[in-house]
């Protein structure tokens, strides 16, 4: 592999960056059909081990690739990512293609419409390879809660690839796709990126349309780009972002120049805050070591680094696990066996309530049931103010902490996750230990700010990837890419090659 600015150029098409592939397709050096087929062949070779995908749309992908090749043959202008393959998290509706959200309750459902993100991908001539595995309805931190089996981390197949978007992150790390889309409710883009050594971005809440994104927690959910490089993520971000009148929470403002910021990759003179609450006890030593090295790198690159105290962040995790389940208990009420998806017990004897109860019992997994019950309790008469109302007050305090911090610094940094990827099954019987995987990422969702995870090396004790989290104010997503690209370039120089170049287990 050779490193040439923003492009990683390889003879193996599956090892190239999205930017390099797009350039090669545009120049006629390779066809989109060849690129797409190479990735479909890679999926056929390794996905039995990884299980990143729930559905492969080979026919649809090759048809789209052929359309791109025909456009180029006619001399039509191609977009920045035209003809490049992508893996789409199975929580975005995709017309005529199964969308299950990792749940049996939606098994076999074929949506009649595209999500806005899906539509924008198609309009940009990006080739959708298929739908990726995920924790059921995005509820989890390990992709062990999927009704269709566990996804494995390509760095070590005995370990988790993060969650809830482990399928998307694993597809990148396994070289099954150069681009992917995830969703981030409490860290489900950034945390999988961290443990697979990839790049994941949670845009500003409202910066990317949620229309057609099957809701878990409506005030927290946010779709975003996943890639192997910061530039690739920026190019994808620019495609999917922007105002959407179909989404009442969509921000009607220009999209920040994320691609220009990634090209700049210069942080000289920036002020960067290290979050005091996200360092110390409970963090794996190798994670802390790589984080502190990354902070020193920021200094070496010309940034001023200061410590920032955000005391309300200590309460973000418990507040999140009241707000998110409360909203999910409302959102998942629509899965009632009457309109779409699974239906159990409709034998002409059982009434509506019995059919609904039997369907939900069979269709929802244990984690989804746990969160529905917790949320319903938190919203019940006599408990609303004590639980949900108090959690929303904590949310306001978290926002104020961010406001104070960003009055003094341009971005905040922390480890993305307290540990590297843990063993599959290790935390399955301990929900609290599982929830701690999102300790560092949740405050960003609570405030609606933008966040990124970028790889900063491997933990010495286990040789697994470590991520640096970068947090920017709302609608300052470009700062993420400016800092992330600078860190990425420094890390590539330090390690002698891009971190994601080979995966040891495949």
Image (tube, helix red, strand yellow):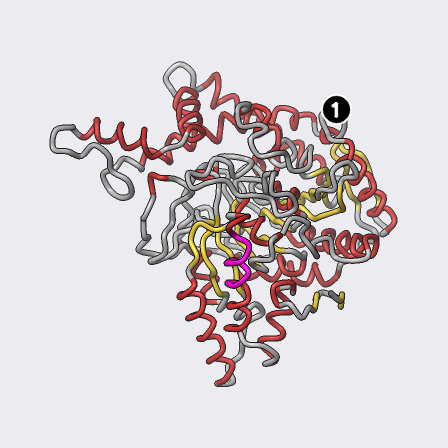
- Majority secondary structure in the magenta region: helix
Q: How many marks?
A: 1
Q: On the rendered structure, is 334 left or right of 124?
A: left
**Is 423 in front, or is 408?**
423
- Residue at left offset 24%, top offset 34%: 344
Q: Residue at x 45, y 75 (%)?
A: 66
The magenta stretch is 40-47
Quadrant placement of the N terminus: bottom right
- Looking at the image, residue 124 lies above or below residue 25: above
Residue 478 in view (yes/no): yes
Q: Residue at x 81, y 42 (%)?
A: 295
Mark 1 = which residue?
281
Q: Nearer the viewer, residue 322 or 420?
A: 420
Q: Where is residue 309? Give x, y as percent.
A: 74, 29
Q: Kindly identify the residue that appears in the image at 38 percent across and 45 percent down.
A: 100
Q: Tell me: residue 388, above or below residue 36.
A: above
Image x and y of residue 305, in percent: 83, 41
């Amino acid at each position: 592999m050779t490193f040439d600015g923003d492009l990683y150029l390889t003879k193996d098409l599956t090892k190239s960056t999205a930017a390099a592939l797009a350039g090669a397709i545009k120049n006629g050096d390779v066809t989109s059909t060849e690129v797409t087929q190479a990735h479909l062949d890679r999926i056929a070779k390794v996905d039995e081990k990884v299980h990143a995908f729930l559905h492969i749309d080979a026919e649809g992908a090759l048809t789209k690739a052929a359309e791109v090749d025909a456009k180029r043959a006619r001399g039509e202008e191609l977009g920045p990512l035209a003809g490049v393959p992508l893996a789409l998290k199975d929580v975005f509706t995709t017309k005529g293609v199964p969308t299950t959200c990792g749940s049996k309750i939606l098994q076999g459902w074929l949506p009649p419409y595209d999500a806005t993100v899906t539509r924008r991908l198609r309009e940009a001539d990006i080739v959708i390879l298929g739908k990726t595995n995920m924790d059921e309805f995005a509820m989890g931190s390990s992709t062990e809660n999927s009704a269709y089996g566990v996804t494995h981390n390509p760095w070590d197949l005995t370990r988790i690839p993060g969650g809830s978007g482990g399928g998307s992150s694993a597809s990148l790390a396994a070289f099954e796709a150069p681009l992917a889309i995830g969703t981030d409710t409490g860290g489900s883009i950034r945390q999988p990126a961290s443990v697979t050594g990839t790049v994941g971005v949670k845009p500003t809440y409202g910066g990317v349309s949620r229309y057609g994104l099957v809701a878990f927690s409506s005030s927290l959910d946010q779709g975003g780009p996943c890639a192997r490089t910061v530039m690739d993520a920026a190019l994808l971000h620019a495609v999917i972002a922007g105002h959407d009148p179909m989404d009442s929470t969509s921000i009607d403002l220009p999209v920040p120049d994320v691609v220009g910021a990634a090209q700049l990759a210069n942080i000289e003179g920036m002020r960067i805050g290290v979050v005091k609450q996200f360092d110390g006890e409970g963090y794996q030593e190798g994670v802390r070591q790589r984080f502190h090295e990354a902070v020193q790198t920021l200094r070496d690159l010309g940034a001023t680094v200061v410590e920032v105290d955000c005391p309300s962040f200590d309460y973000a995790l418990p507040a999140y696990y009241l707000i998110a389940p409360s909203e999910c208990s409302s959102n998942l009420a629509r899965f009632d066996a009457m309109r779409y998806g699974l239906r159990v017990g409709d034998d002409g004897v059982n009434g509506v309530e019995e059919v609904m109860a039997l369907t939900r019992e069979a269709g929802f997994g244990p984690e989804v049931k746990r969160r529905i019950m917790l949320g319903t309790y938190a919203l019940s008469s006599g408990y609303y103010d004590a639980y949900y109302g108090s959690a929303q007050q904590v949310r306001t305090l978290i926002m104020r902490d961010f406001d104070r911090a960003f009055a003094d610094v341009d971005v905040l940094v922390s480890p993305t996750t307290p540990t590297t990827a843990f063993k599959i099954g290790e935390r399955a019987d301990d929900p609290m230990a599982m929830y701690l995987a999102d300790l560092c990422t949740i405050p960003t969702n609570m405030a609606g700010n933008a966040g990124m995870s970028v790889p900063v090396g491997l933990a010495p004790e286990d040789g697994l990837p470590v991520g640096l989290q970068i947090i920017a104010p709302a609608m300052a997503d470009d700062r993420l890419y400016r800092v992330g690209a600078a860190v990425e370039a420094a890390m590539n120089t330090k390690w002698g090659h891009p971190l994601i170049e080979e995966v040891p287990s495949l």
